């Protein structure tokens, strides 16, 4: 990486700079460091009372706290920040691209992703447009994780039916996949009005569509979908025993190979995880227990001890979190992305940021451990730069549509 | 042949466990006939899993012990299920177990139903509460079930006759020695239960898309 390149990339993110400089594809390529395993955090944007004092953040506070977590993630050297999407209380993030666009302007390096993008209730045309916009504005620092959404009542608000969840995910994503790869799309399907001569704008940056992960906890059809396209597969891995995660990943890897994208070990795998750490493990246990006991989803259920032994949740010292996390690859093979859920269950922002400081401290060991014994042929985590390099294409961003007063259409390329 | 007997009695000792043991003995006695295969029968007390079951219902999280039990039941060739009756309903812990059990786990599995209660006024609970549940789970419910009221334990001749009748009917479903020639033991039951793997991929990508008209 050259000095001048670094400067131009940082210029994009500098708040208050008078005009965001244009960055060339060559600069994007040159600026990209090699990251075999991306480490990051994700948030579902829940608004949850702090069980120790009853304090509930306002929606505004929660949103600004999420921005603070994202900025902190870049500061401590994480690779990914991923934001959830919900359309009902007690969540705050309904429009992830708004927030991610804001974060993009305040950061310069971190990849912005989703956890998850609702491929069932969103119009795939709008997803194509929104994330292509974000991809341009962030300089290619965008990927997405597709999810179905498991809240039945949400579907009808968007004219959908949860019983069609899998089918919506299949058809909507198939259209999205085309919209990012074909300049003019004619399309007809079961769930959406047909498209005739439709061009989704802007076209993906450098003609490289954002990388897509498909997230699913227990639907083999989604592992199959990810495998078919050669996309990534993300298993949230936080409420279930690791053996279950292992089975889902195995299925995805087998089918990835079946569809000819390479050997099973080259499939692109991401895992979730969650921890609470303090330097002294007893302090971690004591401090986190009220949050665990009252947390949405698993609160008022199994004991923290049962849950930590049965699922990947780790409550303890940084060393324990390090060792537990490094154990995942024994179950699922070498993988490309590890995200942690850290800002949920009503934890105050101060505590969350302290968690991130501790994560920053173990980050070098985490990176080194994940690479220990990793065969050289295992693919690195995909990024805009790696996909651009792999495409072998010479990026050409000259405008290729007719200008002026016309209907959408593809002009013959002159360049 | 592997049979699991589930008792959801709450007391220790419980009359529900007593009834389960009587049913197990009767099934064993039948299988001691020279032409029968001796089944392996494990008796499980749901009481020991009560907290795990409620946690699984609340959060979806299953302890390893509970998962082992669920796997054991799903992998059994047949089931004996016995519950006490409270307020005209099966015990909550019994109901909870079959709510947590994966759908399809009992499809095609022969099940012998039995219940205990304070008085004979509860005796229809097997037909009115248990049969619909197991029918929904696609189990093959034995045509004779057993209800034991407190008074039945005083002079259990009638109860014993009922147990024999029920076990006779249950055994026919197991493909064991009966009046008719037996079906091979790898008959319809195990085939139906091939769906019990919840992660089994039934359609590949192209089949799923074709079904959508693409």
Image: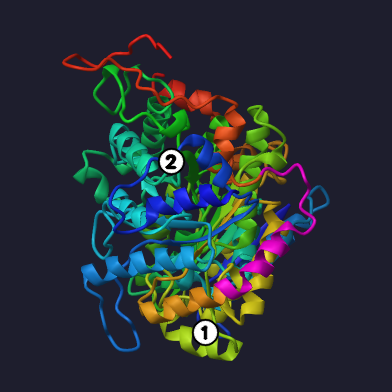
In this image, B38 relative to A89: left or right?
right
Q: Secondary structure at mark 1?
A: loop
Which of these two is toward me, A238 or A378?
A378
Q: Are marks 1 and 2 on the same chain?
A: no
Looking at this rendering, what residue extends furthest in the top direction?
A412
The disc at residue B11 is: 1
Task: Please tell me which residue is depicted at 51% across the width and 52% down the height of the picture.
Answer: A6
- Residues in magenta? A360-379
Which of the chains bears the disc numbered 1? Answer: B
Task: Return the x and y of residue A166 as percentages of the image width and height.
Answer: 41, 38
Q: Residue furthest front?
A: A4
The quadrant of the rendering that contains the C terminus of chain A is top left
- Res. A86 image quadrant: bottom left
Q: Position of residue B69 (x, y in %)?
A: 62, 64
Question: In this view of the protein, which residue sits in the foreground, A273 or B208?
Answer: A273
From this view, report whether residue A348 is shown above or below residue A391: below
Note whether residue A384 is visible: no
- Residue at point 34%, 17% (across, down): A184
**Would residue A140 be found to the left or right of residue A88 on screen?**
right
Magenta stretch encompasses residue A375: yes
Q: Is residue A324 visible?
A: yes
Most common secondary structure along the magenta stretch: helix
Q: Residues within 10 Å of mark 1 (few under 14, many from 20)?
A: few
| Residue B84 within the segment the image draws in magenta | no
Position of residue A56 measured from the top left corner of the image (x, y, whole percent) = 25, 78
Q: Nearer the viewer, mark 1 or mark 2?
A: 2
Mark 2 belongs to which subunit? A
Q: Which mark is residue A23?
A: 2
Q: Residues within 10 Å of mark 2 (few under 14, many from 20)?
A: some
Residue drawn at point x = 48 percent, y = 61 percent: B100
The one nearer the camera, A356 or B6, is A356
Residue A145, x across and y down, in percent: 45, 46
């Amino acid at each position: 990486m050259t000095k001048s390149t670094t400067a131009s990339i940082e210029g994009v993110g500098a708040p208050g700079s008078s005009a965001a400089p244009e960055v060339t594809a060559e600069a994007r390529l040159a600026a990209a460091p090699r990251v075999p395993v991306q480490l990051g955090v994700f948030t579902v944007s829940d608004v949850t009372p702090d069980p120790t004092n009853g304090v509930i953040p306002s929606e505004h506070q929660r949103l600004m706290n999420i921005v603070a977590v994202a900025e902190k993630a870049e500061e401590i050297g994480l690779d990914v920040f991923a934001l959830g999407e919900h359309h009902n209380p007690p969540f705050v993030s309904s429009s992830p691209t708004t927030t991610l666009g804001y974060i993009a302007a305040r950061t310069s390096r971190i990849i912005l992703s989703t956890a998850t993008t609702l491929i069932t209730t969103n119009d795939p045309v709008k997803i194509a447009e929104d994330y292509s916009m974000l991809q341009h504005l962030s300089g290619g620092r965008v990927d997405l994780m597709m999810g179905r959404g498991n809240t039945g009542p949400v579907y009808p608000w968007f004219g959908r039916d949860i019983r069609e969840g899998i089918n919506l995910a299949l058809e909507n994503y198939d259209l999205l996949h085309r919209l990012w790869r074909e300049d003019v799309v004619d399309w007809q399907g079961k769930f959406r009005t047909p498209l005739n001569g439709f061009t989704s704008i802007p076209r993906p940056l450098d003609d490289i569509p954002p990388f897509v992960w498909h997230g699913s906890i227990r639907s083999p059809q989604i592992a199959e979908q990810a495998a078919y396209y050669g996309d990534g597969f993300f298993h949230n891995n936080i409420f279930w025993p690791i053996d279950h995660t292992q089975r889902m990943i195995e299925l995805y890897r087998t089918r990835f190979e079946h569809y000819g994208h390479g050997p099973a070990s080259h499939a692109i795998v991401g895992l979730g995880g969650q921890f609470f750490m303090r330097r002294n493990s007893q302090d971690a246990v004591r401090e986190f227990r009220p949050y665990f006991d009252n947390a949405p989803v698993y609160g008022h259920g199994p004991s923290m001890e049962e849950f930590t032994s049965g699922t990947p949740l780790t409550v303890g010292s940084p060393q324990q979190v390090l060792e537990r996390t490094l154990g995942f690859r024994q179950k699922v093979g070498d993988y490309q992305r590890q995200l942690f859920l850290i800002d949920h269950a009503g934890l105050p922002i101060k505590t969350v940021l302290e968690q991130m400081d501790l994560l920053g401290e173990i980050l070098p060991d985490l990176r080194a451990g994940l690479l220990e014994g990793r065969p050289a042929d295992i693919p690195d985590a995909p990024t805009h730069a790696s996909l651009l390099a792999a495409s072998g294409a010479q990026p050409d961003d000259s405008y290729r549509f007719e200008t002026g007063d016309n209907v959408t259409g593809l002009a013959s390329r002159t360049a | 042949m592997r049979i699991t007997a589930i008792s959801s009695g709450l007391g220790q000792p419980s009359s529900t466990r007593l009834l389960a043991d009587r049913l197990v003995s009767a099934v064993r006695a039948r299988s001691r006939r020279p032409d029968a295969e001796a089944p392996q029968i494990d008796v499980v007390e749901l009481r020991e899993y009560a907290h795990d079951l409620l946690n699984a219902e609340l959060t979806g999280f299953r302890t390893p012990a509970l998962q082992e039990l669920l796997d054991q039941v799903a992998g059994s060739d047949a089931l004996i299920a016995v519950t006490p009756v409270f307020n005209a309903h099966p015990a909550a812990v019994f109901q909870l177990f079959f709510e947590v059990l994966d759908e399809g786990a009992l499809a095609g599995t022969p099940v012998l139903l039995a219940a205990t209660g304070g008085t004979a006024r509860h005796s229809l609970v097997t037909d009115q509460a248990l049969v619909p549940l197991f029918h929904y789970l696609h189990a093959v419910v034995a045509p004779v079930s057993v209800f034991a009221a407190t008074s039945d334990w005083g002079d259990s001749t009638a109860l014993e006759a009922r147990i024999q009748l029920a076990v006779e009917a249950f055994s026919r479903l197991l493909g064991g020695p009966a009046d008719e020639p037996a079906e091979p033991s790898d008959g319809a039951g195990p085939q139906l239960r091939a769906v019990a793997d919840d992660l089994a991929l039934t359609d590949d990508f192209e089949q799923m898309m074709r079904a959508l008209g693409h």
